[in-house]
Amino acid sequence: MNKKSKQTGFTLIEIIAVLIILGILAAVAVPKMMNMQKEARIATVKQLRNSMMSAVNMCYAQAELRGLVRINPHNMSNPTYTSLPANTIPGVTTDVRLRNGCPANVQELVKIMDIGDFYIQGGGDKIVIFDRCGVLYKNGYTVSGVPHPNEINDGGVLYRPITDGC
């Protein structure tokens, strides 16, 4: 009896076709994935900026309630420095130094924010979350010239996202 053995498997042409299709998909997907990482970092920076603004507003409200804001925060020519006592804001265990009712600098702002592993750079005026990604914070900033397109200057308190290194 003659039995023909039936071979199973893929032909060389089928394997090459599948490899070409996978190569095309990889060529399209990899650049999109790389761009998604940058977009995610920029979104994180913007969220950090918004969290900083919320923390400053909360601190200002507490200072206002306690009579610690003695001048108009929009008048930066004569700032008033005061301190918000510890435990005024839940979880804050040390006094927070204020300038016109807002945290005087990044070190003071970090006291009222739970920001984990983020770190301060640039003479203490930036919170950096990635290599060159973060937010610049300055209390007592006056606008001179054309402002940065993404910065927010809220009554002399500057918040500027730094996204060139994301």
Image (cartoon, rainbow, N blue to C red):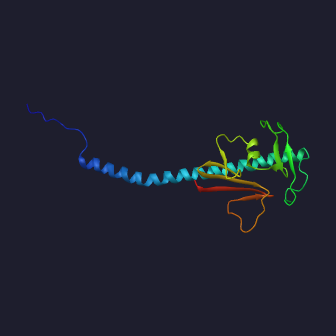
Q: How many marks?
A: 0
Report the front residue among 149 and 127. Answer: 127
Q: Residue furthest bottom?
A: 145
Report the front residue among 11 and 54. Answer: 54
Which residue lies at the image location 70% right of the left edge and 59% below the top edge?
A: 151
Q: Residue 108: where, in percent of width, then height?
A: 77, 45
Horizontally, is 15 left or right of 23 in the view?
A: left
Which residue lies at the image location 84% right of the left edge and 47% below the top edge?
A: 61
Report the front residue among 72 and 6. Answer: 72
Q: Residue 49: where, in percent of width, then height?
A: 70, 51
Q: Is residue 145 above or below residue 74?
A: below
Q: Residue furthest top?
A: 1
Q: Residue furthest left?
A: 1
Q: Residue 22: where, in percent of width, then height?
A: 37, 49
Which residue lies at the image location 54% right of the left edge and 50% below the top edge?
A: 37
Indicate the quadrant where residue 114 lies. top right
Which residue lies at the image location 35% right of the left edge and 51% below the top edge?
A: 21
Q: Residue 109: where, in percent of width, then height?
A: 75, 46
Q: Is residue 150 above or below residue 134?
A: below
Indicate the quadrant where residue 93 lies. top right
Q: Residue furthest front?
A: 123
Report the front residue among 16 and 151. Answer: 151
Where's the N terminus, which quadrant? top left
